[in-house]
Amino acid sequence: MVKVFWCVGMPRPDFMKFFSSRINYMYPSPIREMVAKIAYKSRIKPVISFAAGEPDPDVLPRDIYASMVSDIFVRENRIVNYSPAEGVLDLREAIAGFMKSHEYVDTSYERIIVTVGGSQALDIIARIMLEPGDVVVTENPSYVNTLLCWKHYGVRIVGVPMDDNGMITEKLEETLKKLREEGRLVKLIYSIPTGQNPSGITMSMDRRKHLLEIASKYDLIVVEDTAYNHLVYEEVDVKPLRALDKEDRIIYVGSFSKVLGTGLRIGWLEASPEVIEKIRYSKQPMDMCAPVPCQYLVLEVLKRGLFDEIKAKAIKAYKEKRDLMMAALDKYLPQLKHTRPVAGMFILLWLPEELNAIEFADKLLEKYDVAVIPATPFYTNGSGKNVIRMNFSMAKPELIDDGVNRIAKLVKELVAPAVA
């Protein structure tokens, strides 16, 4: 075997001339960057983390998963081979049944493709539908990793403001009119109607219906991200956009990650046959298939009727944590605005206007060993400079009050000198 070593003085390639133009649209994920900082700090001393966007691993039934996986490996010889690119057929049929029983959507396995989490689903949508210069309209703020992913394709993201009832659909229509007058090509509306990331806000039924009316009027496709549909803590009268859709305008992005575990990486796309066909063609050379053992594990969870049991345990745990976090915010930072989510995993907190969220998050981690995510990158227009995102699902209940108190201490330290 011949080994080649690079030595000082030998010419090295100029890699920049080999990259595609797409690298000009690539930026680091602020979530992953912060996670790296937290991991480093955690090796030195304990950190109270409100930064994650995941289910609590201690809430998930890992022992049940272990037993089921063992049984499946013995029973299913196909678990060690590829599945079809569309996913294991039995799982696709089970997902169709799940959507009917849990989402009020009457669909079939032919309209479903299993993906590597919701993230791959969103990437595939961009691959088959978006060209450089196209416009995607989203809530403002919106999920930063979707924004970063779609920007890789050279699209322009335009945000529509939100209030406590979700995207303000009157502003959505104003935005679409303005973009049309400018000659811009709007392709998609992207929305996370329930437990929105990063705000935790849930869109009202009236807004959902109005959004669909607008999509019909302007002949647009709506991408519905349902990652948090099954983490709802209050009695709310909402249905997925897909359940209200009469014109087949919704591309439904589903995920089991937030209830069953993010590491399983099992999501799905449900859409019209024309869209599904192109998704299949795009996915076949991309990854061959989603992880087959995980597909069979999720299938087993659905077949045994365990999803609702796992969900109920998660809702009980996360509702308790949500209530603790909101109570602590009201106690220690009553003067500051924060969202009050009925679903999802997140609360947005508006710091005093003179504070910078990115600098604040760094100082908070460095001085007080508390981790939060600056929400600024989630905003589509450069606003939100004083907003932080706080996750309650992963936090230890006994540490939430102390963590929020430390946030309040830093706020007072940074604002008091300016006031003085």
Image: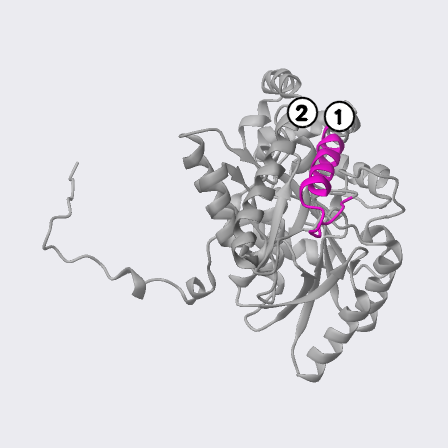
Secondary structure under the numbered disc 1 in the rendered image: helix
Label 1 is placed on what type of residue? Lys
Q: Is residue 307 left or right of residue 27?
A: right
Q: Residue 270 appears at what percent x and percent y?
A: 73, 49
Q: Nearer the viewer, residue 278 or 247?
A: 247
What is the quadrant of the C terminus in the image? bottom right
Label 2 to label 1, Cα distance in Å?
A: 7 Å
- Count the numbered circles shown: 2
Membership of 420 in magenta stretch = no
Query: Is 178 located above or below residue 379 in the figure?
Result: below
Q: Is residue 243 left or right of residue 270?
A: right
Q: Which residues are magenta?
A: 317-341
The reply to whether dot 2 and dot 1 touch (C-beta < 8 Å) is yes
Q: Nearer the viewer, residue 138 or 336?
A: 336
What is the quadrant of the N terminus in the image? top left
Disc 2 crowd, CA 10 A, few/some/many (<14, 14-19, 20+):
many
Name the quadrant containing residue 108. Answer: top right
Membership of 335 in magenta stretch = yes
Instruction: Tell me the residue that label 2 is attached to.
Output: 59
Name the quadrant containing residue 312. Answer: top right
Q: Is residue 220 left or right of residue 147?
A: right
Which is the main secondary structure of the residues drawn in magenta? helix
Instruction: Tell me the residue that label 1 is attached to.
Output: 313
Q: Nearer the viewer, residue 350 or 237?
A: 350
